[in-house]
Image: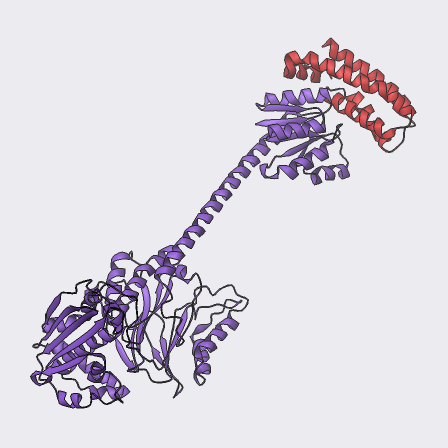
Amino acid sequence: MKEMIQQLKDLLGDDFSTLVKAYDEDNRAILDSLGGLIKSGQSEEVARQIHSLKGASANIGAENLSQTCQTLEHNARAGDLSDAPELLATIQSQFEEAVTLLKEA
Amino acid sequence: MKILIAEDNATDRLILKKLVEQQGHEVVEAKNGKEAIEKYSSELPGIVLLDVIMPEADGFEVAKFIKLNYDALYTPIIFITSLTETEFLVKCIESGGDDFFTKPFNRIVLQAKIDAFIRAKNLYQTVVKQKQEIELYSEHLVQEQRVAKQIFDNVAHKGALEEAYISYSVSALSIFNGDILLAAKRPLGGVNVLLGDFTGHGLPASIGALPVSDIFYSMTTKGFELFEIISKLNERLHSILPTGFFCCAILAEIDFEQNSLTFWNGGLPDAYLIKRKSGELLELPSSHLPLGIVENDKYDINIDMMAFEDGDSIFIYSDGVIEAEDDRGEMFGRDNLVLALLNGVSEGKSFDSVSQAIKSHSKGSSQGDDITFLEVRNHFEDQTYSPDEVEQVQVKSGPSDSSINLFLGPQSLKSYNPMPMLFDMLMEIGNLRSYRTPLFTILTELYSNSLEHGILKLSSSLKRSADGFAEYYRLREARLDALKDGYVKIAISHADLADGGMLTIHFEDSGEGFDYKSVENIKDDSKLSGRGYPLIYKLADSVVFDNNGSTVTIKFRWYSTGKPQ
């Protein structure tokens, strides 16, 4: 992930901080909403939201996070939310790691 | 190039924007589908990078909108996606997508895709521009041809083609295939026809049609002989047509009163003289060079004269007829043509028979645009000599107080026809134009009488049989060729009168005269018909012979309205 972050810094220059801010805030909002969506069983909306997080995470090089998102999205699309709370917990901690790495960079 | 990025996730949008800008393109951003549609419509970007899952109209809707409303702009749409299910990809293509770009973004892949689409788009625009240019040229050409055809239709009008004794087939655009078909009545009865086939196609092939038509109609109307018309046509075409361009042609003069056919074929397929009585077809092959190839002094204008009896007809065609193809590319051919002609002979319906044969042959084939053919049938022509009645015209107009004295020596008699010149001038006087037929008849009869009987000593009794007729013209040519002495003097004067005028026409020749008393004696015989002096007695106001008949003076009275007051 560090390698990707360096590439992004080169690409974005001064806008890198904007990227960090946008990634942190937008996706934190998604994660905040996901708990409720899982509880109320809205699998389709879960898939939709996690799809967005998955793409953005892939683009900043957070491969593990993107992978976990993919699993949740896949299950949610199939209407299966049984593992969703555990996956969400994993995603939340991986997200915090990613944000920390971005902010340190 | 201006590129629209429609992506709801700010992280992805920012990265993509930077990647695209890094490659030197201008970026227009949209955060959702609705904004994408608005930005597309106002900015008209060259390429669209489109996220699929977006709020406010998804990527499919945006793609459909663009393809529906701006299809002609050919805007490549690249879907941004991390979805890989086949069903989903199919939906992207169906909604108008051209390609995919997957997350995580790869700079090299993006650059390759954008560059490829720019190349394709440029190519597309070049093709569209060329297509528009071609359409414009094509439209222009069609317009020009339409205008050209109008001009040709005016000049190469139908003339006498609509007469009941003529049947013809010619396509509307035949002029652009180089075919030209003309027919004009001769001032003394009978008809001249011309079928020409210029080398080549399109406008170059049709340019020559203008002078041909012009010369043919004006010279026929002025009473020029067929060989004079051919000579003029050849001279003009030789001077205007570039090397390698020429005109194959048939010219024919048919005299329904003398039952004769004068025929000339320069390079066209054999024409056919159809003898209905015997059921025979006589071939009339080409025996001359086409028009426009060599200069007149190297040009042979020998004309064939033959009998054209009651029931006879002449069939003339251009090679499009025998070259007409059926759906297998098989040509109609000369054998089929002759067969069709023979099938129709007994009923006098050769033309219809040929028409039908060609039609059934070329059925299912789009060919047949340059098929031109014509049949002229013998018929009884009732020549009317009465003048046209007109509103009052000015009496003393044109050269009304003039006189002409013309002396024609042997050389002039051999090579010059004075009739058109005299006729041209007389037509300018008062209302004489209304009297063109009787006047022309009188002048022509007087001249041929002086030349053929007075000087060349030909006997008109020869003309009574078909064979004698040909013999008459053979002798005429031979004796004219050998002529060393002799002359014809023509004196014409005009006097104005209150309600018209009086022409005095005087002919004198160096011949020995003839037994004019026998003509005078029968002048009151009402059964008189045919040509020669009996006709002149009928048309003129007075006929006075002198010098044993080698001098004759005619008075011809005309009225300003075409009839006595």
| Rendered colour, chain B | purple
Identity of the residue drawn at 38% across and 88% down: B278
- Quadrant (top left/top right/bottom left/bottom right) for the C terminus of chain B: bottom left
Please provide percent x and percent y for residue B533. 19, 83
Q: Is residue B509 left or right of residue B161?
A: left
Please provide percent x and percent y for residue B562. 27, 71
Residue in the foreground of this view, choosing between B547 and B298: B547
Figure quadrant of residue B122: top right
- Quadrant (top left/top right/bottom left/bottom right) for the N terminus of chain B: top right
Please provide percent x and percent y for residue B356. 50, 75
Residue B445 in the image: above or below residue B180: below
Residue B308 in the image: above or below residue B361: below
Would you say residue B367 is visible in this rendering? yes
Would you say residue B109 is visible in this rendering? no
| Rendered colour, chain A | red
Identity of the residue drawn at 80% across and 21% down: A65
Q: Is residue B192 left or right of residue B505?
A: right
Residue B332 in the image: above or below residue B149: below
Figure quadrant of residue B319: bottom left
Residue in the foreground of this view, choosing between A84 and B147: B147
Please provide percent x and percent y for residue B477. 18, 78
Q: How many marks?
A: 0
Residue in the foreground of this view, choosing between B1 and B557: B557
